[in-house]
Image (cartoon, rainbow, N blue to C red):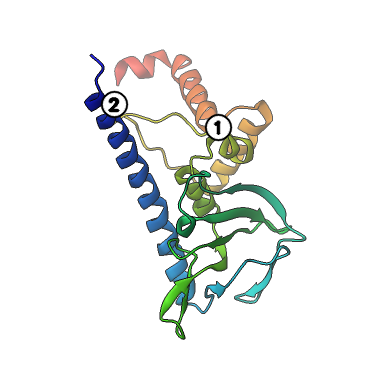
């Protein structure tokens, strides 16, 4: 039965769920940013340049010559101090990176010694492909994830068998699966089932 109490409780649960999601992505970003800052790649004060170019660890990251894939920003009703903008790029050589900027309540904020306070800041954050995928997962960019990286395999249960392939075999499987337009997992499952169907005696004697 509907009641005002029921509606308020539902709204509260939604708010708690959203806070948990935001907490997860912010913790993830803080971890990545901290690791970079320990290596000398630090946050900068103010608005991120439209054409962002940085040399980090001897490599150039230039948004003007990179492919822009997707971006994330908060809903319009987000408090001003929590505003952010994050854009995912890939260089011509295939390196992923994130250009982020945000206000004082975000991981991108910059510490001002003179005022002893946080202010709007920005940063270019190099990412591995796995980190880029994880960022998209946490930001809920599911369709863009599929558009860029393809559909992931379905989640597997506890009875899953882990199959480790030699690097050369893995490359051959990936090439064969790509040629047929299927995932590597689907190709391997079909190949195993085909081999088992062709060896009934061995299967029965196992």
Total marks shown come to: 2
Residue to which mark 2 is pinned: 7
Looking at the image, is mark 2 or mark 1 earlier in the sequence? 2
Q: Residues within 10 Å of mark 1 (few under 14, many from 20)?
A: few
The residue where tag 1 is placed is 151
- Is disc 1 placed on a helix, strand or loop? loop
List x then y, in percent, for residue 163.
41, 38
In the image, residue 71 above or below residue 37:
above
Secondary element at image label 2: helix
Percent position of residue 181, x then y: 65, 27
Residue 182: x, y in percent?
60, 27
The structure residue drawn at horizontal position 51% and vertical position 22%, both measured from the top left corner, is 190
The outermost residue toward the bottom is 114
Disc on res. 31: none
Q: What residue is drawn where x is 65% and y is 55%?
A: 89
| Residue projecting furthest to the right | 65
């Amino acid at each position: 039965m509907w009641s005002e109490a029921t509606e308020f409780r539902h709204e509260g649960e939604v708010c708690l769920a959203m806070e948990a999601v935001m907490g997860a992505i912010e913790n993830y970003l803080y971890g990545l940013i901290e690791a970079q800052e320990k290596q000398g790649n630090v946050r900068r004060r103010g608005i991120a340049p439209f054409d962002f170019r940085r040399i980090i660890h001897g490599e150039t990251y230039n948004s003007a010559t990179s492919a822009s894939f997707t971006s994330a920003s908060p809903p319009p009703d987000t408090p001003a101090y929590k505003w952010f903008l994050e854009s995912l790029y890939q260089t011509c050589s295939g390196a992923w990176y994130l250009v982020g900027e945000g206000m004082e309540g975000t991981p991108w904020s910059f510490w001002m010694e003179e005022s002893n306070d946080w202010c709007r800041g920005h940063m270019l954050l190099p990412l591995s492909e796995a980190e880029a995928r994880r960022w998209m997962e946490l930001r809920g960019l599911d369709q863009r994830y599929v558009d860029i990286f393809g559909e992931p395999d379905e989640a597997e249960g506890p009875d899953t068998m882990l199959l480790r392939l030699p690097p050369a075999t893995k490359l051959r499987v990936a090439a064969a699966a790509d040629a047929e337009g299927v995932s590597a997992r689907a190709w391997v499952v079909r190949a195993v089932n085909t081999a088992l169907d062709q060896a009934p005696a061995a299967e029965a004697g196992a």
